[in-house]
């Protein structure tokens, strides 16, 4: 699969994919739609890219003017490729890559400052990781109030709207994929 940055200062730049079938990069058209929805909110944002895979979502945010990004994935090959893609765009000084089990907890980000304005989340489809990840995000106390959380997920794994902590503000369907936009309310 060809992987490239869709917009911003590095528009058209090719990124390296992770070999094998463990990583499913966000398709260009879905990534473009995500950033059309986010609009100018990405500018000067501190971004958290969860289940980062190749780092394409966070790197896209940096290309479009985000101030910094933290990438978290539990796979060593993914983290290697994220670092390689970050370096190819000269974003080393604005980023941090962490190998971590996101579903266990997000204690790894509790002390990172500034807090996150924007969370980009692309968990493995149909593995029931969304609810625990949202709970761990809340418990980490690392989000600003009204932070945007963008989740790419399968239509077969809907997001519960019973959260008093996160409010669903929009949802778009792209075939078998949903992109849900939540706001952090606390």
Image (cartoon, rainbow, N blue to C red):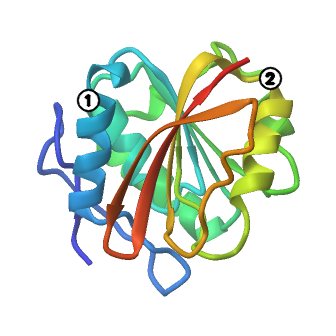
- The foreground one among 65 and 119 is 119
Q: Residue furthest left?
A: 12
Q: Quadrant of residue 138?
A: top right
Residue 76: x, y in percent?
Answer: 65, 66
- The foreground one among 159 and 129 is 159
Above-or-below relation of 151 to 61: below
Residue 99: x, y in percent?
Answer: 71, 54
Residue 82: x, y in percent?
Answer: 48, 54
Residue 177: x, y in percent?
Answer: 41, 68
2 vs 1, front mark: 2
Q: Residue furthest bottom?
A: 20
Q: Is residue 113 left or right of residue 12?
A: right
Tag 2 residue: 141
Q: Residue at x 28, y 58 (%)?
A: 30
Q: Residue furthest front?
A: 162
Kindly tell me whether residue 50 is visible in this rendering. yes
Tag 1 residue: 64
**Among numbered discs 2 and 1, the one appearing first in the sequence:** 1
Q: Is residue 60 left or right of residue 141?
A: left
Q: Residue at x 16, y 31 (%)?
A: 9
- The foreground one among 18 and 41 is 41
Q: Residue at x 81, y 42 (%)?
A: 135
């Amino acid at each position: 699969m060809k992987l490239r940055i869709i917009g911003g200062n590095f528009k058209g730049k090719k990124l390296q994919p992770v070999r094998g079938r463990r990583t499913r990069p966000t398709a260009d058209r879905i990534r473009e739609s995500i950033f059309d929805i986010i609009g100018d909110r990405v500018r000067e944002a501190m971004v958290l890219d969860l289940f980062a895979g190749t780092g394409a979502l966070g790197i896209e945010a940096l290309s479009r003017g985000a101030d910094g990004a933290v990438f978290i994935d539990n796979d060593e090959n993914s983290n290697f490729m994220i670092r390689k893609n970050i370096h190819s765009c000269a974003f080393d000084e604005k980023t941090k890559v962490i190998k971590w089990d996101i579903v266990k907890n997000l204690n790894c980000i509790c002390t990172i400052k500034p807090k996150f304005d924007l969370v980009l989340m692309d968990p493995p489809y149909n593995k029931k990781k969304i609810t625990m990840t949202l709970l761990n995000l809340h418990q980490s106390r690392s989000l600003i109030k009204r932070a945007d959380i963008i989740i790419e997920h399968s239509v077969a794994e809907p997001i519960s709207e019973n959260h008093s902590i996160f409010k669903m503000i929009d949802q778009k369907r792209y075939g078998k994929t949903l992109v849900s936009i939540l706001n952090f309310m606390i």
